[in-house]
Amino acid sequence: SSLALRRKHLISQDIAMVTTLSMREANQNFSELARRVEAGEEIVVTRHGKPVLRMVPAQARGRVPTPEQEAAWQRFRDFAESGWTASGGWKFSCDEIYEERLDELERRRNRNKG
């Protein structure tokens, strides 16, 4: 059975979704979490609601992007910061998409509490 893990957004240089769960949940589901991390997922473990460790794939740590990959990421970041124009002329930015997603997650969280 799959874990119903909470998702939180963290902002660093790029926007990334990270799975977060408590120390107890991590302990009880370590094998499943190890498989998910091996598959590339990042998991943050909390104690009393505060992040205490981050599980990431081992091989990702030592990998250094090539100059071509760095240039591609920079082109994407530049494009993302400038925003997109959707059909009908509606223009939106990464920040707007991020805020909309956070609002949706908050609505779901509130709906599940009640």
Image (tube, rainbow, N blue to C red):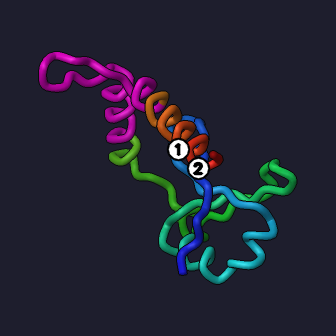
Q: Main secondary structure of the magenta part?
A: helix
Q: Quadrant of the N terminus?
A: bottom right
Tell me if 72 is positioned left or right of 63 in this view: left
Residues shaded magenta: 71-98
Q: Quadrant of residue 46?
A: bottom right
Instruction: Name the residue furthest left.
Output: 88
Instruction: Name the residue furthest front.
Output: 114
Tell me if 6 is positioned left or right of 65 in this view: right
Which element is circle 2 on?
A: helix
Tell me if 30 is positioned left or right of 66 in this view: right
Height in image: 68 above or below 34?
Answer: above
- Per the rendering, the mark at residue 108 is 1
Q: Amino acid at mark 2?
A: Asn
The location of residue 58, given as percent across then percent down, is 61, 70
Instruction: Answer whether residue 73 is magenta in the image.
Output: yes
Marks 1 and 2, how far apart at CA: 6 Å
In the foreground, 17 or 48: 48
Height in image: 106 above or below 58?
Answer: above
The location of residue 18, given as percent across then percent down, is 58, 52
The location of residue 37, given as percent across then percent down, is 57, 70
Residue ID for mark 2? 112
Q: Amino acid at mark 1?
A: Arg
**x 36%, y 48%: residue:** 69
- Per the rendering, the mark at residue 24 is none
The local crowd at label 2, few if under 14, some if 14 to 19, many if 20 or more residues have their Cα within 10 Å, is few
**x 63%, y 45%: residue:** 114
Tell me if 97 is positioned left or right of 91 in this view: right
Residue contact at pointers 1 and 2, CB within 8 angstroms: yes
**x 54%, y 75%: residue:** 2
In the foreground, 8 or 114: 114
**x 39%, y 31%: residue:** 77
